[in-house]
Structures are given as structure tokens and as C-alpha cells.
Image (cartoon, helix red, strand yellow):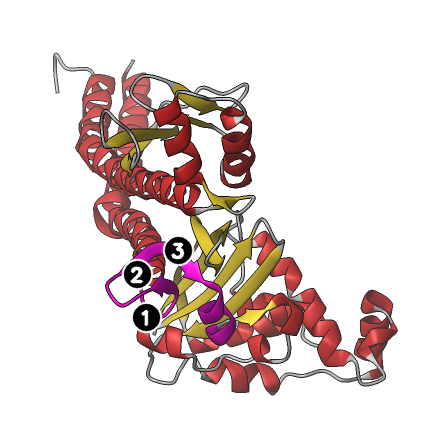
Amino acid sequence: MKGIEPITILVGFTIGILMLFVPLLATTIHLVQNINFESQVNNAQLTLLALLSSTYQGKQISQIIAEAVQQNQYRNLDEILSIQLNKITDCYKLSTPSKVLAQSKDCTPTKYTASTLISLPFSEGKMAEKIILVMN
Amino acid sequence: MKAISNVFMYVFWTLLAIAFIISLYFFGIGGFLKISTIFEGSEVDRHAVILANVLISSDKLSYSDENKIYRGLLDLNKLNRYFVSEGTFDIHPFIIKSNPIIEEFSYPNSEVYISVWDFDAQKSWVLAGNGPSDGKLAGFGSCIFSKIKLDPRTIFRLIAYHGTAALGGKGITFVAEKVKIPVAQSVNLVTQYTWSTRLLAMTGIWDQYDLKECENAVATKSGTTSKSFPVAIRISENEIHLGSLNIQLTEYKL
């Protein structure tokens, strides 16, 4: 034992034990994070699906968006989409690749993204538009 | 000098012994419990997510035509057929009973409580039941009914807490009205007790320790989780409401 302080051995021993548990802790945290992430992405997809399927004053939301996009007329669209989205989520941003259609106030979502294509049946140009929903 | 050296050696060996005991705990039962707890907790979460996705993709609940099933678009008629709606709550949710939906889609040794909310019409539907088991979960019912307390003190407590509706033949209606509370809570909260326990506790006929005793006598709870999923509800061809499907799943080790 000469030359090595007991406290040095003790500290070394303790650090050694702690190091053994770092990978274990990292693995379990990773597992839980993955499950939460997949669950939330799934929810973002369901939210987009439910929103586009739902109706506002007898008209389907996907149809309202499609008409606005192909006519390039976005009056009241933000309001209608916000009314619908506020029922199911607090933090959202709904957009096409070129325009933001609706966004929650006081919150910028970044975490979970879902997207789908909606048809533009009477458009002279492209036949479909990509709709992207970002949620927190 | 020798005495000081001895003190240091005692301290060293004591600390080493403590470190050894702690390491034994972590390497042995402690490490095992830590892994099991987190992993199995996640397993219940995964099961709840999977079960909800199966339900909203199933022909039993979702709207379907001849060609396809519309995932996430629940059919009002099917909800009314398989679920108990808010307006018609009766004694049924009180009893763990078989239901075609639960019989077809459920995990073994589990209790499941499903509620569907229509945000536009402010309506809700509930469904509760247990997955296949070897009959031990059903033993919970007989255990709890053997512990009914109908002494004057309990009856007084019932009246004091819940008003005179508990008397005069309106007991069932009274219980039904109270069912709304756990439905609302289940949206975001992971509650301490299962749906059946919470329903039973609200009546005041049982004490909390009786409920706990029966739970422990039947099985060990391996985890409870509560999750909410956005869905659309098809009311008619031109009317589709936004809503959510909430699922509370409790799994047991028998």
C-alpha cells in the first residue's frame, strides 16, 4: 500500500463503478426517448389526418385548403384552420412548401412533422399540393 | 502516528465495505429492478400506442366502405353500437364485462379503459374491459363485492358526500353521472388506480384499503399508462367532427 493513498484507491474504485452504469443509463434513456418520439410523430400524423378529414360548416377542410391553394385566395383560411387545430393541439404550424397556412400564437413548433398530399382536382398546373404539419 | 494511520485504515475499509455493498446492490437486484422498471413501463406505453392504432385502423370502429377502411375516421354508428355514450351511462361500465371490441383487441392480463371525445358536439363515449386472463382478474369483482360496507356510517357518508340521489332508487343514475369525472381526467392524467377502482371508490361504499387489498390479492400491477390520440368522427356524409381517442391501459403480472 506504500506510495498509494487509500483515498486514491477509493476514488478510483467509485469512479470505476459509476462508469459501468453510464452506458446502462444512456440505453434506458434512449429507449424511453425513442418510444415518446414515435408516439408523438404518430400523433402528428393523426392530427393532420383528422384535420383534413374534418368538416367546417359542411365543407371538408382538405377541400377548403385545395380551393384556396388553386385560386391563390387565402382569406379567412388562417382563421378556419386555427379554429379546427386549436381543438386538438396547442402548438402547431400548417403550411404548404411555399406558404404558411396557419400558425399558433406564442409558440413555434419544431419537434414533430407530418405531411401528406391533397388533390387539386380543378387546378390547371399541378394536381396535388403537399401539406406539412409541425407540432410540439 | 500509528494511531492516526489506524484510523485512516478503518475509515478506508469502512468506505470500501459500503462501496462493496452498494455495488452488490447495483450489480444484483438493484440493477435488475432498474432495468425492469423502465423497460416494462415503456412496454405498457408501447402497448397502449399499438392498441390505439389497431383500434382506429379497425373495421370495428373506423368508417369503411366496400373498398377501404378509413384510418382515424371513427364511425358514429359503430361508436354507438360498441361504446356506452354519455347520455346512456348505466350500470354497465361498473362491471368488468366482455365486449366484442375488447375481446378482439386486447393484451392478456390487462385492463383497458377507452373513451372517445367529440370536441365539436361535446359528446363522449366510453368502453372498459379486461383482456384474456386465466380468470384471476375477474376475481377482483368477487373480492370487492365481498367487502361492501352498508353500515349506517357508510350510508350517512354516501348521503353527505353525494346528496340524496343515492337514495330513492336513483343510485344507478347517480353513479352514471359520476362516470364523467374519470373520463375527463383520463385525457391527460396517469391515475393511481385503474378505471374500475376509481369508479368503485367514488361510490364511497368501499374504503381505499379494501380496494388496494383486492387489487393486491388478484395480481401485481406491472404498469399503467394513459394516452390520447387525435381522431375524426364521421357523423354523416357531410359532417365530420374532430375528437380524441383516449386509452388507459393497465397490465398485470399474474
Q: How far apart, in angstroms, are the residues tagged by discs 1 and 2?
A: 8 Å
Q: Nearer the viewer, mark 3 or mark 1?
A: 3
Residue situated furthest left in the rendering: A2
Say what amino acid the circle numbered 3 marks.
Answer: Leu
Q: Chain of mark 2?
A: B
Contact, mark 2 vs mark 3 (Cβ under 8 Å): no
Q: Residues within 10 Å of mark 3 (few under 14, many from 20)?
A: many
Label 2 secondary element = helix
Numbered range of the magenta stretch: B57-82
Observer-nearest of A131 and B54: A131
On screen, residue B85 versus residue B222, left or right, reads: right
Task: Find disc 1 in the rendering and name its residue.
Answer: B105
What is the three-letter code of the residue carrying label 1? Phe
Residue B73 place in picture, x, y as percent? 39, 55
User: With B176 as the anchor, is B214 left or right in this view?
Assistant: left
Q: How many numbered discs sit on the rendered protein?
A: 3
Q: Is residue A50 visible?
A: yes
Numbered disc 3: what chain? B
Where residue B57 is drawn, which disc sits there? none
Which of discs 2 and 3 lies nearer the camera? The answer is 3
Q: Secondary structure at mark 3?
A: strand
Residue B245's place in the image compared with A71, above or below, is: below
- Which residue, given by chain and number where applicable, does mark 3 sit on? B73
The image position of residue A101, as x and y in percent, is 43, 23
User: Both on one chain, marks 2 and 3?
Assistant: yes
Q: From the viewer's side, name the closer residue of B22 and B46.
A: B46
- Residue at x 24%, y 21% (from the top left corner): A11
Q: In terms of sequence position, does the residue under pointer 3 or pointer 1 come before the other?
A: 3
Which residue was labeled with disc 2?
B54
Q: Are marks 1 and 2 in contact (CB under 8 Å)?
A: yes
